[in-house]
Image (cartoon, rainbow, N blue to C red):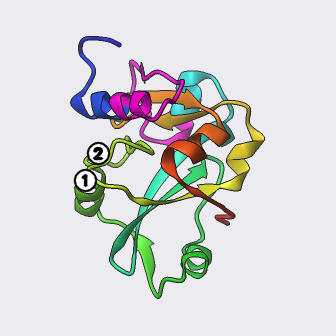
Amino acid sequence: MPEKLHPNAVRVASALRELGATGEIVVLPDSARTAAEAAAAVGVDVGAIVKSMLFEADGAPLLVLTSGAHNVDVNLIARTVGAEKVRRAAPEFVRAATGQPIGGVGPVGHPAPIRTLVDSWLGKHEVIWAAGGHPHAVFPTTFDELLRITGGTVVEVE
């Protein structure tokens, strides 16, 4: 791991090791805040990028890990989790819940566990790439490993 790894990426890397994940954090020279930027940076189809989207579901954090090729239907997610109201979380809420900035939210390494949903379409890819806690940090994983390390529930998101 590079010496200059951002502290958020260090936390994600530590969580990955503790959880027995195989992927290592890769620091990109340019930002990968969007799925398209991440896909271009690692040379994969945008659908193989894990887009981390934090929502407020009746006031509680809900992390939806979706394929970079998908949008999230908040009404479908609300019905799926039995919530009255689901909405995109404000940047301050994202940072408080995850300890990470929008554009770099990893699936692990948060201050406390977050209920997590995982887009079934990510399973169509042999290797998927997720954010590593910072907009310049990503790591490779598999669908099965992502489910295991997040304790996520497989769902349809759109």
Q: Is residue 71 above or below residue 35?
A: below
* Span of residues in magenta: 13-36
Label 2 residue SS: loop
For label 1, the SS is helix
Mark number, residue 100: 2
Query: Where is the N terminus found, in terms of image quarters?
Result: top left
Which residue is located at x 52 percent, y 47 percent? 51
Q: Are marks 2 and 1 in contact (CB under 8 Å)?
A: yes
The residue drawn where x is 57% and y is 23% is 42
**Between discs 2 and 1, the one toward the N terminus:** 1
The residue nearer to you, when weighing 96 against 40, is 96
**Residue at the extreme right:** 124
Q: How many marks are shown on the rendered structure?
A: 2
Mark 1 lies on residue: 95
The residue lying at 25 percent from left, 26 percent from top is 6
Measuring from the top left, give residue 81's x and y in whole percent: 55, 76
Quarter of the image where one finds residue 118: bottom right
**What amino acid does circle 1 point to?**
Arg
52, 112: nearer the viewer: 112
